Amino acid sequence: MIRNPLSVSFSVWRAIFLREALDRLFDMRGAWFWLLAEPVLHIGFMAFVFSIMRVRTVGNVDVFVWIMVGMLAFFLFRRIAVQVSYAVDCNRPLFTYRQVKPFDPAIARAVLEAFLMAIISTFILGTAALLGHDTFPGDSLLVMQAVFGLWLFGFGYGLVASVLMELVAEMEHVLKILMLPLYLISGVIWPLSAVPHPYRDILMINPIAHGLELVRLGFFPDYHTVSGLSMQYLYAWAVISVFLGLLLYRRFALQLVMR
Amino acid sequence: MIIVEDLHKRYKTEHGPGKWVLQGVNLTIPRNVNVGLIGANGAGKSTLLSIIGGIDHPNKGRVERRCRLSWPMGQGGLEPTLTGRQNAKFVCRVHGHQEDLADRLAFVLDFSELGEAFDEPVNTYSSGMRSRLQFALSLAFDFDTYISDEVTAAGDAAFRKKAAAAFQAMTNRAGLIMVAHDEGALKQFCQAGIFLYQAKALWFDDIGEAFKAYKDTMPT
């Protein structure tokens, strides 16, 4: 019996997905707890800081939910980008089975991370709703569209980054240094609409900033957002990075796997 | 049947391309024959196995696999932090055996004789236990040809006997390509031999002849 290539790929994705889930949730004692604790602590700390500064609203909306939504969307991007970057490296023993190609762990990790973030986000937003905040999105479709754009861009970024790190070892440090300011310049903890004019346009080159603002706009229909916000811009980056990543994987598949 | 045509392989080193590990290797490995691969350390035995197994790629030449071929046992393939059972599940799923997972797991547990250690992480295993797990794992699937790098010969005498018996039992159904440093083990498992010398491969229908050729090249 010869299985067709698609069914081989599906069974490989399924196997890696389950394996990765096990690794991510039960790798060390309480690994699943820290997955949840990281965003909760970040959000809690920033909410605390804002409440001390007596900031109640940002751009006409509840600051607490504003931080929560932005933070979760940013974490979605960052976790997928990082997990996919190291997908090949962490699954090296699996390439002993020639059914497994370098792309397989990457897609499995991206999908797994999306699942985990969906659960974590539902949990955090649900808890906030019980505490009396209005966390139900006003325009769910817009939220989904923006979140999917961020997911896609994270995936593409991870694909490109993993090949770059494999080809040029120093890139790992460069990309790590890039990730830190990304948190600040994407408008996670302060509104980009407060940035004066020439600099705001520069910050809006960053597609993640577009993604975060769009997710917020989906949650609060009367949110005062940054001008020049564009869904197309986010998706252009996402699609181009994914295709570039796939191209690099095709070209450098052997270098990625071979020792 | 496995056909290897004009295979060239060299690795990248710190100082540019290294010397040829395999240079112009031509082989035809028939079905249902147990073949032993012999040669000095660094002669390219493991390299040839991983290229035949499809996990490494030649610089030039090609390999045609006209059979279902196992992965090269013994060249990794186990995730150290997961338990034996979790690793086994993964391998079953990759090979498309989601439905009869329980049967295959039962077979692996039974054949590897790991007992309770089956539910312990693989990094707690001894090298003999690892080999037994890998060996049992590949036997859980119906391959036409099995590739083994130092696995079959590892393990204690009792396990080796059991492994040899398993291959004898399916001798009219499946073949084996193996590397081992122990002459006794190779003769126990294999009829034919391939001798790797100076980046070339020589085929011998009788493994004894291959060993004789190997010993002739050794300085006395």
Image (cartoon, rainbow, N blue to C red):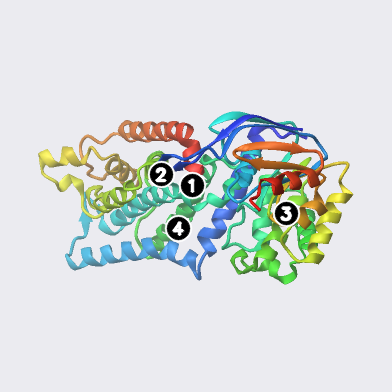
Specify whether disc 3 shares its chain with disc 2.
Answer: no
Please report whichever mark, 2 or 4, sits nearer to the chain's N-terminal start: 4
* Residue B98 spot, x, y in % from top left: 72, 48
Q: Amino acid at mark 2?
A: Glu
Circle 4 chain: A
Q: Which mark is residue A166?
A: 2
Does the residue at mark 3 contact the one at mark 2 (Cβ under 8 Å)? no
Residue A181 showing in the rendered view: yes
Q: Which mark is residue B194?
A: none
Secondary structure beneath dot 4 equals helix
| Placement of the N terminus of chain A among the 4 image quadrants | top right
Front residue of this view, candidates B105 and A52: B105
Specify whether disc 4 shares its chain with disc 1.
Answer: yes
Please report whichever mark, 4 or 1, sits nearer to the chain's N-terminal start: 1
Front residue of this view, candidates B131 and A110: B131
Q: Which residue is mark 3?
A: B137
Q: Which residue is mark 1?
A: A88
Residue drawn at 64 percent across, 57 percent down: B87
Q: Quadrant of residue A39?
A: bottom left
Specify whether disc 2 shares its chain with disc 1.
Answer: yes
Q: CA distance from mark 2 to mark 1?
A: 10 Å
Q: Quadrant of residue A64?
A: bottom left
Q: Which residue is mark 4?
A: A120
Specify whether disc 2 shares its chain with disc 4.
Answer: yes
- For disc 2, the neighbor class at 10 Å (few under 14, some 14 to 19, many from 20) is some
Q: Given this view, does label 4 or label 1 mark the residue nearer the observer?
A: 1
Q: Given this view, does label 4 or label 3 mark the residue nearer the observer?
A: 3
